Image (tube, rainbow, N blue to C red):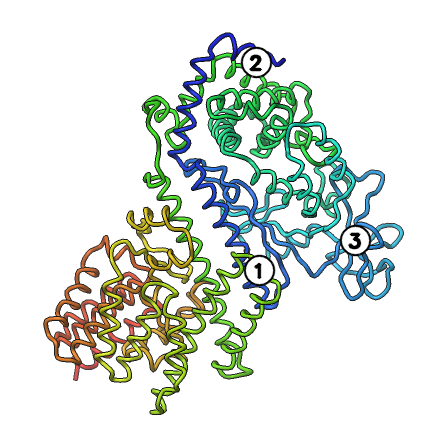
């Protein structure tokens, strides 16, 4: 029996039971609850699908995986966890044995030498023509040994990403990044589990956890080889570390809320308390060590321990497991045999310091919990009555759900932007042909093996969006030439109208306006106006964010109760985009947005702006008002025209509302045009100058200002 068993049973059973129940509820309030955890997991699985589908239809053979706290649901807003993305290069075939060789592929054989550290392999280049090693080639990606064998360097990834990101490039172990909250790992997938992982299945037969079903599923997971050599190895730059991320994710997804909450609290303790005892510059006490301790504790303890009224005891049990590792000076990997997680990461001095700190926490009855600052956990513990139960619509939980949904659809839109950019640059065929080919490719993916709900949701979204572009491009061509619209145009528009609550319908209304069908335009605009209430959240794929990106409270509350794609699109308003091929379906004033560059403006665009700044993009709500102004002006309905004018004026004269726009300079330009149509050129010029004061380059206001100045001078 553990010493803590007696401690809990004899000393303070009532106190710890009460503290456990309150802690359980407090964690529910800060996003560690079934509905938010599930949302996090679904959101990141969706992101994987979006990236995979986009890469596949772009001809890039890679597969993406999100691992870590964000995708597992073991984080809170206060923990500010990184987002970890691992992507595999599928062009390579990883051979665990010669039986795995494949003709016509880039083959790498996993090799271990006598001095190769545990968990590491060398990747020897094997010919794709005959199953023999490739020898003697002078290439920076390969290192040759004394026998002429070629081994793939793990520094290739570092070199490529450093070239891509320049001064922004950062490296941490196998991960590379260009920003502090994102980690990218390029890896190879190995479908065969090596012996040091296979032995785990035998060891697990004698524990309480994981279940037999989970173990059977784990055998089908495979593993990854990441570019990370052992810190003390002479072959550090050609060693690749095996990592069973998929098995670890499977284990995390199998857990109920008690161990998840336990891990979250351990992470909070690590962030605030344990970091104080890491004195050496090169030492790290990572959250992975806490996950390892949790896994070992789950394996050793009876399932009856893992109940909410024993949550604090679960935390102490995990701390005691860490104490055991610190006392021995070795932290074994839960899955990979023969690995010490302390090796190269935590010196003996820091281990002893941490050991004393953890012992003090346990002896002090875990009062440290009342001092945790992350998510105000300590204050919440002292303030929350034991009978208060959180609900899904709490501000924190709703905010998390709303942000996850916004980020998910923002990724959809960014990939749509990339797809449209590739279509525009493809000069081998006309735009309609390019669109048809792309739609056919995407629809074939849905039929030929891409059967997950996440793949299909994204494919359905992207196909609908491309249908909208196709309808608009077709209509634009007909309006330009004066030809009647084809019979199938209404079917195309109909299939694309539900991408979101506004953008596709606004493009339809704009087409009607450009055709001179003003009453039809007004009818569609009225429908959009009715749906575009204050619960609708604007989203854009331009790569930027508004100055004020605070989400609508009603939208966040809606996302808690509704999680299907169809339901969520009813509360999202995407920015309206017109490609140059669609310009005759856009009001002529917007054409200047497609040619906004003056002089060397193009050289002053960042990587996200190079595509969309050659198109017209405008926030949905202001564009609705602008179209209403033009339409009711044409219809001679002055009071509705003025309503739209004052609605637009309310947006651009309120700094708070202006800061919520993605394309505020375009909205200011539209407002300036309204003043022109009202006959006040001086006010229009003032509005254009206001637009230019905040964005002097890549702003169509430069053209409008020159035009009005010439007009005034003449």
Whichever of labels 2 and 3 marks the residue nearer the N terminus, that label is: 2
**Residue at numbered disc 2:** 5
Element type where label 3 sits in the image = strand
Element type where label 2 sits in the image = helix
- The residue under the point 48% across, 65% down is 460
Q: Is residue 271 visible?
A: no
Circle 1 or circle 3, nearest the eye: 1
Label 2 crowd (10 A; few <14 / some 14-19 / many >=20): few
**Taking 565 as reference, is 272 above or below it?**
above
Whichever of labels 1 and 2 marks the residue nearer the N terminus, that label is: 2
Camera-side residue: 140 or 353?
353
Whichever of labels 1 and 3 marks the residue nearer the N terminus, that label is: 3
Using the image, tell me which numbered label, if any, was put on residue 35.
none
Residue 698, x across and y down, in percent: 36, 69
Circle 1 or circle 2, nearest the eye: 1
Is residue 187 rendered to the left or right of residue 598? right
Circle 2 or circle 3, nearest the eye: 2
Is residue 445 rendered to the left or right of residue 197? left
**Taking 209 as reference, is 496 above or below it?**
below
Q: Which residue is the extreme one toward the top? A: 10
Using the image, tell me which numbered label, if any, was put on residue 451.
1
Quadrant housing the N terminus: top right
Residue 532, x across and y down, in percent: 26, 61
**Residue at numbered disc 3:** 95
Marker count (numbered): 3
Which of the 4 image quadrants contains residue 325? top right
């Amino acid at each position: 029996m553990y010493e803590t068993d007696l401690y809990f049973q004899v000393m303070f059973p009532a106190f710890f039971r009460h503290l456990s129940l309150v802690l359980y509820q407090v964690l529910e309030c800060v996003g560690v609850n079934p509905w938010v955890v599930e949302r996090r997991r679904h959101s990141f699985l969706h992101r994987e699908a979006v990236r995979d589908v986009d890469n596949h239809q772009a001809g890039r053979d890679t597969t993406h995986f999100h691992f870590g706290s964000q995708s597992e649901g073991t984080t809170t807003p206060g923990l500010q966890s990184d987002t970890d993305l691992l992507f595999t290069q599928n062009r390579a075939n990883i051979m665990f044995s010669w039986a795995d060789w494949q003709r016509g592929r880039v083959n790498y054989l996993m090799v271990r030498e006598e001095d190769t550290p545990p968990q590491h392999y060398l990747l020897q280049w094997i010919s794709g023509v005959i199953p023999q090693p490739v020898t003697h080639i002078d290439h920076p990606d390969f290192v040759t040994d004394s026998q002429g064998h070629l081994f793939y360097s793990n520094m290739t990834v570092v070199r490529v990403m450093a070239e891509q990101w320049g001064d922004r490039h950062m490296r941490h172990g196998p991960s590379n990044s260009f920003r502090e909250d994102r980690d990218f790992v390029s890896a190879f997938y190995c479908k065969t589990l090596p012996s040091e992982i296979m032995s785990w299945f035998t060891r697990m037969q004698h524990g309480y956890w994981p279940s037999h079903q989970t173990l059977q599923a784990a055998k089908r997971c495979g593993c990854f080889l990441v570019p990370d050599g052992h810190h003390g190895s002479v072959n550090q730059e050609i060693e690749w570390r095996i990592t069973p991320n998929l098995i670890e994710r499977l284990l995390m997804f199998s857990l109920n809320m008690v161990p998840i909450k336990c891990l979250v609290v351990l992470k909070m303790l690590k962030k605030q308390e344990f970091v104080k005892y890491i004195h050496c510059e090169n030492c790290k006490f990572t959250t992975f060590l806490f996950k390892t301790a949790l896994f070992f504790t789950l394996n050793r303890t009876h399932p009856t321990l893992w109940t909410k009224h024993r949550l604090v005891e679960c935390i102490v049990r995990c701390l005691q497991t860490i104490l055991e590792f610190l006392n021995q000076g070795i932290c074994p990997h839960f899955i990979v045999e023969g690995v010490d997680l302390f090796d190269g990461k935590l010196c003996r001095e820091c281990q002893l310091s941490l050991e004393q700190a953890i012992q003090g926490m346990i002896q002090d009855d875990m009062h440290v919990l009342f001092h945790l600052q992350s998510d105000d956990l300590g204050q919440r513990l002292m303030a929350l009555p034991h009978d208060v139960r959180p609900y899904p619509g709490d501000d924190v939980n709703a905010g998390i759900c709303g942000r996850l949904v916004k980020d998910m659809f923002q990724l959809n839109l960014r990939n749509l932007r990339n797809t449209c950019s590739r279509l525009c640059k493809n000069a081998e065929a006309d735009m309609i042909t390019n669109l048809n080919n792309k739609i056919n490719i995407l629809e074939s993916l849905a039929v030929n093996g891409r059967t997950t709900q996440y793949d299909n949701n994204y494919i359905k979204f992207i196909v609908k969006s491309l249908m909208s572009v196709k309808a608009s491009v077709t209509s634009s061509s007909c309006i330009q030439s004066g030809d009647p619209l084809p019979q199938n145009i209404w079917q195309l528009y109909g299939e694309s109208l539900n991408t979101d609550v506004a953008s596709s319908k606004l493009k339809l209304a704009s087409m009607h306006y450009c055709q001179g069908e003003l009453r039809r335009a007004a009818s569609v605009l009225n429908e959009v106006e009715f749906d575009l209430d204050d619960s609708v959240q604007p989203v854009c794929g331009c790569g930027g964010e508004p100055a004020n990106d605070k989400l609508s409270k009603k939208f966040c509350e809606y996302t808690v109760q509704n999680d299907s794609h169809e339901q969520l699109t009813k509360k999202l308003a995407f920015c309206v985009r017109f490609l140059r091929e669609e310009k005759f379906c856009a009001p002529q004033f917007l054409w200047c947005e497609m040619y906004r560059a003056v002089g060397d403006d193009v050289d002053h665009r960042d990587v996200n702006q190079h595509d969309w700044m050659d198109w017209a993009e405008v926030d949905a709500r202001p564009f609705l008002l602008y179209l209403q102004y033009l339409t009711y002006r044409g219809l001679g309905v002055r009071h509705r025209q003025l309503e739209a004018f004052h609605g637009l004026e309310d947006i651009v004269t309120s700094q708070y509302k202006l800061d919520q726009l993605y394309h505020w300079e375009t909205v200011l330009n539209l407002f300036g045009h309204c003043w022109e149509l009202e006959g006040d050129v001086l006010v229009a010029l003032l509005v254009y100058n206001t637009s230019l004061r905040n964005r002097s380059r890549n702003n169509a206001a430069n053209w409008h200002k020159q035009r009005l100045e010439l007009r005034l001078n003449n």
